[in-house]
Amino acid sequence: MSVARQRVLILGAGAVGGYFGARLIEGGIDVTFLVRPGRAAGLARDGLRVVSPLGDVTMPVRVLLADAPRGADEAPFALVVMSPKAYDLPAAINAVAPFVAPGTGVLPLLNGIAHIEHLRARFGAHRVLGGVAHLAATLRPDGVVAHLSPLAEIRYGAFSPGHEVALQALDRAFRRAGVAATLSGAIEQDLWDKLVFLATLAGMTCLMRASVGDIVATPAGERLILALLEECRAIAAASGCAPAEAVMARHRALLTEPGSQFTASMLRDIERRAPAEADHILGDLRRRGAALGIAAPLLDIAGTHLEAYAARRLR
């Protein structure tokens, strides 16, 4: 199969999958979306619609339903891209499993790192790739993928040799579509770098129910944010993935910017009383820190706060 005709399956056509899938199609990749019946009907009627500061698109797309039988003569997918919420990961794994052939790579675009172990257990370590997406987007009630800011960055790479051809094709397609994409040779470090930042952002904005700017405007706010950031950095370092000082400098700047309205999506989930990815982000990091003997009292407070929210929500 030629590189140009390699097929990519994307689980879902929501904010992340829909946006990056549309850009891959613009870049010449053969993309199919694996979706639920309701989303399939909307895509058949209206096409995939993206509104973005980087260019609006409306396009017809190919879709599959999760329980649809596969044709015996269908070419296999080179990559399966997954971007579910962490609490939906078991169902997502079951949905894509029938489409993972011997040569297929599985590229998750989830926050955190805990999902990597689950995917390796199901599909084998040699099939699982790493991906990090930075995108402010939402799926509107009318089915439109609304990209909310010019930020649209994606990094991906392999933990070990393999799938180079498919990743290189993906990289060329994203670049043709104008996406800030990076084929990374250090994807495990990239995942840890984002986890350190996100755990701090989510922990503090959820705990304080406030934006970064509101927190740092208080007498102790900046000190507490930086203390939590240091706890998260220490766990990453003890795990063999210490963020570089340049990365930490960017984290500090974003997390202490005066007047910033920056919040974690986890806070937005809590404000609408929805499930949150707390255990996958803060819970996983706390368990890793405890196993390494690292004291992280602020991380414990933020994590316990979110555990209590989850328990109360279930009642």
Image (spheres, rainbow, N blue to C red):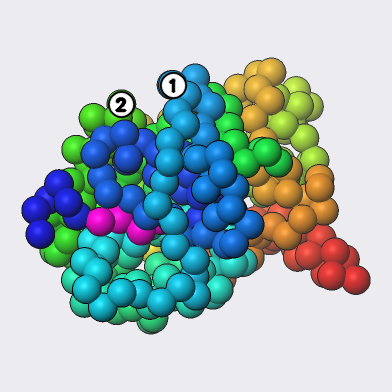
In the displayed structure, 286 sits above or below 269; it is below
Q: Quadrant of residue 107?
A: bottom left
Residue at far right of view:
315
Question: Percent x, y for residue 148?
Answer: 58, 27
The answer to whether residue 173 of the structure is visible from this angle is: yes
Residue at (90% x, 71% y) in the render: 315
Give yes or no for contact between labels 1 and 2 (Cβ–Cβ under 8 Å).
yes
Question: In the rendered image, which quarter contains the N terminus?
Answer: bottom left
Dot 2: element: loop
Q: Is residue 8 magenta?
A: yes
Q: Alpha-carbon neighbours of circle 2 within 10 Å: few (<14), some, or many (≥20)?
A: some
Give the label on residue 55, or none: 1
What residue would you read off at disc 2? 178
Q: Which residues are magenta?
A: 7-11
Q: Amino acid at mark 1?
A: Gly
Q: Is residue 113 magenta?
A: no
The residue drawn where x is 21% and y is 66% is: 75
Mark whose residue sits in front, 1 or 2: 1
Q: Is residue 20 left or right of residue 204?
A: left
Dot 1 or dot 2, earlier in sequence: 1
